[in-house]
Each structure stands twice: as structure tokens, then as C-alpha cells.
Image: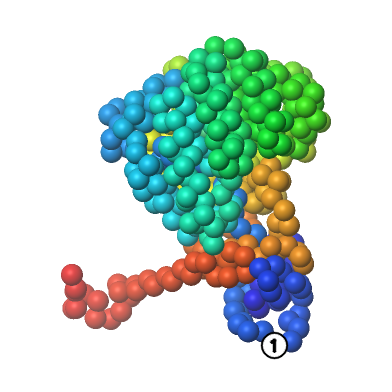
């Protein structure tokens, strides 16, 4: 691939790609089977959406009313879930995956609900989709206890079955259970039993009324699971006073826990009891980044009671976060691009991720030259490359008919 403008280089370079990997970065060496000249466009590693619910996406047409709180969203979605079928889950998930792949997402972690309502139906459907979409996106499937574990038997047994079926990791939701500490213990026990990573939906309130993340830190260290645990939402962290917040952020950094901010959901569902100066309800992204915590922005939900909007394009999340999290300088915008590329790659423990020699050739070619333009202008994608092959090619055609002399004389339907 010729004349690629890489994020960390001043001048465009050529990338030699073979066997699904970047072999060389620099001047082109020798003849290639296929040569693509990207004409100095920005090339980044593939986008990584680290937290997505494909199984409950695209429900707006069948759910009456919108949720005002997370509890209400869980209730409305739980009711809709009773009518799910495997074909229905796969159909909606495919529509979202197609959007994500076209946007340049080459890796995604999907939370798949495993509970007494859907049983293992979602996991079965998603395992088939993981194989179907393997040429375009690496899907990590997280067996997720949205309805709780202790309050929803036999969820623990179902989670174990899901891991036996091939789930890649285990996910908990301690705020939606009767005993949060015990819930976290069950998740860590399953993570240890199957040797998999753990990912929690945690501390999803305006006030610091749960702070279950403290227990997650303790159990991460006790299990020796540093670098293998993620915490999603974590909005309560933003409500802690300065010194207390700084101490907890330092604990997260020491335990190498990744934080996944879900800005579209959090901005939508937090701050609902505020009548004046409504809070934004985002985890403190900048402070976490400054402390060296890997922070990802992720889609979470696409058009359901938790989040009425969504495009499955991670770039859109950076656009929102630039204003919602006050990250508007060029350097901070570059940091925001890292929250949908290198940081989530680290949280998902993706191997050989990046634009260097030896990395997997999962790449996005953008219609722009600089990283900060991704955030400020949402440029179209030109090409998406997965495992060294072009997976998506975008064509754009804009005809500015108003500019032509005869525009007014020759209107057309
Ligand atoms: Zn979620």
C-alpha cells in the first residue's frame, strides 16, 4: 500500500503487506501482487469497539416508550427479550455488524446476554455470527449476566455452559444483583476456572452510591488478573471528591484495569434527577488517561431503551466526547482517537495491533490527513483492510448540480 500517512510519521510511507501482516514500513521493496496507492491519506489501525450489545440492538420499533433510568431500560429491554428468537437476534446483529465493518471496525467485544429469559439462545446465534464475520471483524464474545447471577438462577450454570460453548470471556453486572460482592466473586471464579478475561458493567449512577469497582480492584489483585479486567460505565467515579477520586484512579492504574466509557448511553441516562445544571454523567476520561489507565470509548447500545440513537461508528463517539468531556485541543483529540484504537486494543488484549512491521494488517484509510480531523470532522472512510485484504471499499460521488450553468434550466427528479 503506497503513500500512507501514518499517525506518528511526518511523511507518507509505503506499507508492504503479506500473509495478513505488515512486513515492512518504509520505501516499497520489490514488486507486489497488488498495489494500492492511497495518495497520502491518513492510515490508522482498525477501529476497536470494546463494548457492544448486538443481541439487544435495534429495538426502537418494538419497545413502547423511552427509558428515563437504567433500571427502566433494563425492565423495558427485559420485556422485549421474551420475544427474541435466534433468527431475530442474528438479523439485528448483522445490521449493526455491517455498519461497524463499513465504519472501519476490525475488532469488537460483544456482550451476549445469558440468563433465564434467553438462556443460551443469544450465545448460539452470536457464535455462528462470529464465524460468519471472521473475514471482516474479530468478535470477542462476553457471556454477560445482565439480569444478575444470584437473583436470577440458574444464571451461574448458564454462564458456565456459555464458556464451554466458546464464549471468550465473562461479564458481570453487580449493580443489578442482590449481593454485589458475591456476584463479583462468581465472575472471578468463572474467569479463573476457564482462564478468561472479565468485564464488568459497574457503578452506573450519578452519585457514588455503589463503588463496586473497589471490590473489583481487590479481587483483580487477589486473582492475579491485572491487565485482564475491564470496567464499563464507571460514571460514579466522576462524583467522587478530588482526593478520593485520585486515590481510586491510582488503584485502577495499579491493577491495570481498563475503563470503558459509554458516552451515548451515559449522557442519555445519567443526570435525570437534576433539574438545574444537569450533569453529564461521564467517567472522568481525562483524569484516567493522565493517570495511565487505558480508556476506551465504546458504542454499548444502538437504538434501544438504553440509547435511542447509534451508528456503530466509533469515530462518532470521539466527536461527542470532544465536547462532552472537554477534549478539544489537537493533542486531546489525538488522545480521543487512541480511545477507539490503541487503548481498546490493549483492553481486549489484541495481539500484534498497530501500524508497525509485524502487526496484523487491519487498517483504515481515511479521507483526511491528520488524526485530529477524525474527531473534529468525521471524515468518510476510503478503505478498510482486514488481515491484509481490502474488506470494504467506499465510493463517494457528489454532484454539485447547483454549480453548473444549466442547473436551473435542467431540473431533474
Ligand atoms: Zn453495556
Q: Nearer the viewer, residue 4 or 177?
A: 177
Q: Is residue 120 visible?
A: yes
- From the viewer's perspective, is residue 18 above or below residue 63? below
Residue 150: quarter of image: top right
Q: Residue at x 61, y 15 (%)?
A: 180
Quarter containing the C terminus: bottom left
Q: How is the rendered protein coloured?
A: rainbow
Q: Is residue 39 visible?
A: no
- Farthest bottom residue in view: 31
- From the viewer's perspective, is residue 33 above or below residue 292? below
Q: Nearer the viewer, residue 375 or 86?
A: 86
Q: Residue at x 42, y 70 (%)?
A: 396
**In terms of secondary structure, where does tag 1 sit?**
loop
Q: Position of residue 35 (x, y in %)?
A: 61, 82
Q: Nearer the viewer, residue 405 or 288?
A: 288
- List the residue tagged with mark 1: 31
Q: Residue at x 55, y 40 (%)?
A: 165
Indicate yes or no: mark 1 CB to ligand 1 under 8 Å. Answer: no
Residue 248: quarter of image: top right
Q: Position of residue 336 (x, y in %)?
A: 64, 47
Within 10 angstroms of label 1, few (less than 14), some, or many (20 or more) residues? Answer: few
Q: Tell me if 237 is positioned left or right of 136 in this view.
A: right
Quarter containing the N terminus: bottom right
Q: Position of residue 88 (x, y in %)?
A: 34, 43
Residue 244: quarter of image: top right
Q: Position of residue 143 (x, y in %)?
A: 55, 35
Number of marks in the rendered image:
1
Q: Residue at x 71, y 69 (%)?
A: 22
Amino acid at each position: 500500500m503506497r503513500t500512507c500517512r501514518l499517525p506518528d510519521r511526518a511523511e507518507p510511507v509505503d506499507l508492504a503487506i503479506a500473509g495478513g501482516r505488515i512486513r515492512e514500513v518504509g520505501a516499497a521493496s520489490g514488486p507486489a501482487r497488488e498495489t494500492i496507492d492511497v495518495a497520502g491519506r491518513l492510515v490508522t489501525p482498525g477501529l476497536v469497539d470494546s463494548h457492544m450489545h448486538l443481541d439487544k440492538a435495534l429495538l426502537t420499533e418494538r419497545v413502547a416508550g423511552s427509558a428515563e433510568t437504567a433500571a427502566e431500560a433494563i425492565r423495558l429491554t427485559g420485556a422485549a427479550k421474551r420475544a427474541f428468537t435466534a433468527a431475530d437476534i442474528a438479523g439485528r446483529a448483522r445490521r449493526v455488524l455491517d455498519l461497524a465493518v463499513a465504519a472501519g471496525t476490525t475488532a469488537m467485544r460483544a456482550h451476549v446476554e445469558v440468563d433465564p429469559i434467553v438462556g443460551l439462545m443469544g450465545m448460539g446465534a452470536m457464535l455462528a455470527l462470529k464465524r460468519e464475520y471472521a473475514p471482516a471483524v474479530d468478535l470477542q464474545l462476553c457471556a454477560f449476566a445482565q439480569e444478575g447471577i444470584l437473583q436470577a438462577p440458574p444464571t451461574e450454570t448458564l454462564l458456565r455452559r456459555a464458556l464451554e460453548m466458546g464464549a471468550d470471556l465473562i461479564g458481570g453486572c453487580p449493580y443489578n444483583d442482590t449481593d454485589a460482592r458475591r456476584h463479583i466473586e462468581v465472575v472471578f471464579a468463572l474467569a479463573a476456572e476457564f482462564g478468561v478475561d472479565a468485564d464488568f458493567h459497574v457503578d452506573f449512577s450519578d452519585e457514588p452510591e455503589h463503588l463496586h469497582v473497589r471490590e473489583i480492584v481487590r479481587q483483580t489483585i487477589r486473582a492475579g488478573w491485572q491487565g485482564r479486567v475491564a470496567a464499563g460505565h464507571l460514571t460514579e467515579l466522576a462524583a467522587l471528591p478530588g482526593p478520593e477520586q485520585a486515590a481510586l484512579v491510582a488503584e485502577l492504574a495499579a491493577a491495570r484495569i481498563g475503563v470503558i466509557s459509554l458516552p451515548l448511553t451515559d449522557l442519555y441516562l445519567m443526570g435525570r434527577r437534576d433539574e438545574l445544571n444537569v450533569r453529564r454523567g461521564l467517567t472522568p476520561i481525562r483524569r484516567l488517561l493522565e493517570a495511565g489507565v487505558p480508556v476506551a470509548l465504546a458504542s454499548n447500545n444502538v437504538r434501544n431503551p438504553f440509547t435511542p440513537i447509534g451508528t456503530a461508528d466509533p469515530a462518532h463517539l470521539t466527536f461527542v466526547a470532544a465536547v462532552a468531556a472537554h477534549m478539544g485541543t489537537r493533542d486531546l483529540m489525538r488522545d480521543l482517537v487512541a480511545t477507539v484504537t490503541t487503548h481498546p486494543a490493549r483492553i481486549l488484549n489484541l495481539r500484534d495491533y498497530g501500524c508497525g512491521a509485524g502487526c496484523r494488517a487491519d487498517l483504515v484509510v481515511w479521507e483526511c490527513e491528520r488524526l485530529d480531523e477524525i474527531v473534529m470532522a468525521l471524515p468518510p472512510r476510503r478503505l478498510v483492510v482486514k488481515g491484509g485484504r481490502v474488506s470494504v471499499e467506499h465510493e463517494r460521488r457528489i454532484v454539485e448540480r447547483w454549480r453548473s450553468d444549466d442547473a436551473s434550466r435542467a431540473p431533474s427528479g
